[in-house]
Image (spheres, grey):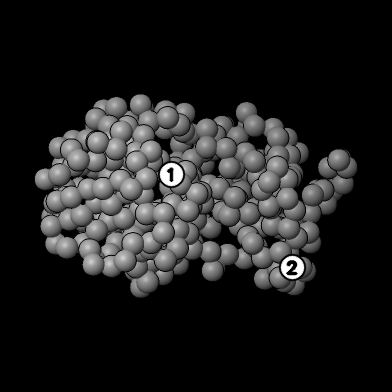
């Protein structure tokens, strides 16, 4: 599932490429992806896009008539910026053709992505957006500390809860917790304020670090080969490989269908003081 670094890189790649272009044709081979109605796409003919914002795991394309095209790529949504003559990827669901001969295509192996076209002041009509917490890259430390006090449970699931804070998923929660030295199943209620401040700083540092790498990769490789870029990650999907910090084999543990990866040595479940309780 694309997370903040992936979506930021897509945004940075597309903004300058879409500038000044006009939509000439649209198509929705998988019509139900467009939740506000596939016929909506035709109303984009003759229009162009300005800014693209990111809200959590949503991309918001500003249409030049004040409307917003909102896209949530969910698990496997992928954007392609290609010339019209190029062969379409499998499961291409939405196509926007522009007057310079390029197409912005969206493919989705699991076909779970969601498009919405809404008025500029109706963003709250998009399901989930109204409930989104502050974005992980916009939230201030004080607000982070205040909000996380209401979530005493396991820290990894809290980080992934979009109502608590938007933008972090399975991959980057693993990376942030490894960076902080916290076990993914550690309960927030057993963590000190110092732990939480370190967690906040690690989150910002990890996302900033990863965003630069993913940005560079996307600028070089272009869009369409992957929906997410994971080659730089230290523990996520690296079960059995050595922890880059201590050499211990990275552990993979599946709970509720989600695999968490962490280092048992760098991320002990119990506090070294012995204050933690066995589960
Ligand atoms: Zn380690």
| Nearer to the camera, 207 or 190 | 207
- Is residue 117 visible from the viewing direction of this image? yes
The reply to whether the C-beta atoms of the residues labelled 1 and 2 are less than 8 Å apart is no
Which numbered marker is on residue 113? 1
User: On the rendered image, what quadrant is the C terminus found in?
Assistant: top right
The residue identified by callout 2 is 240
Q: Could you tell me which secondary element the residue under label 2 belongs to? A: loop
Rendering coords of residue 101 (x, y %): 17, 63
Sequence-earlier tag: 1 or 2: 1
Spatial separation of the CA atoms under disc 1 and disc 2: 32 Å
Rendering coords of residue 48 (x, y %): 16, 48
Tell me the crowding category of disc 2: few under 14, some 14 to 19, or many 20 or more residues within 10 angstroms, Cα based.
some
The answer to whether residue 255 is left or right of residue 107 is: right
Circle 1 or circle 2, nearest the eye: 1
Image height of 4 relative to 145, above or below: below
Q: Which residue is pictured at 28% across the width and 52% down the height?
A: 95
Rendering coords of residue 123 (x, y %): 32, 31
| Nearer to the camera, 159 or 49 | 49
């Amino acid at each position: 599932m694309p997370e903040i670094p992936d979506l930021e890189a897509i945004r940075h790649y597309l903004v300058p490429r879409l500038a000044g272009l006009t939509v000439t044709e649209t198509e929705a081979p998988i019509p139900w992806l467009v939740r506000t109605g596939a016929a909506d796409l035709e109303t984009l003919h003759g229009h162009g896009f300005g800014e693209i914002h990111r809200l959590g795991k949503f991309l918001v394309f500003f249409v030049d008539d004040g409307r917003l095209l909102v896209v949530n790529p969910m698990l496997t949504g992928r954007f392609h910026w290609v010339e019209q003559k190029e062969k379409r990827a499998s499961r291409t669901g939405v196509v926007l053709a522009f007057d310079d001969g390029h197409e912005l295509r969206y493919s989705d192996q699991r076909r779970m992505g969601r498009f919405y076209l809404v008025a500029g002041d109706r963003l709250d009509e998009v399901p989930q957006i109204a409930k989104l917490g502050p974005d992980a890259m916009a939230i201030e430390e004080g607000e982070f500390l205040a909000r996380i006090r209401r979530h005493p449970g396991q820290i990894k699931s809290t980080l992934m809860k979009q109502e608590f804070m938007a933008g972090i998923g399975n991959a980057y929660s693993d990376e942030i917790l490894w960076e902080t030295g916290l076990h993914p199943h550690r309960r927030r209620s057993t963590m000190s304020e110092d732990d939480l401040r370190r967690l906040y700083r690690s989150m910002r540092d990890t996302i900033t670090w990863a965003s630069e790498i993913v940005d560079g990769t996307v600028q070089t490789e272009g869009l369409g080969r992957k929906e997410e870029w994971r080659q730089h990650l230290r523990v996520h999907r690296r079960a059995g490989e050595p922890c880059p910090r201590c050499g211990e084999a990275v552990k993979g543990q599946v709970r509720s269908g989600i695999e968490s990866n962490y280092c048992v040595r760098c991320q002990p479940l119990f506090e070294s003081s012995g204050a933690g309780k066995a589960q």
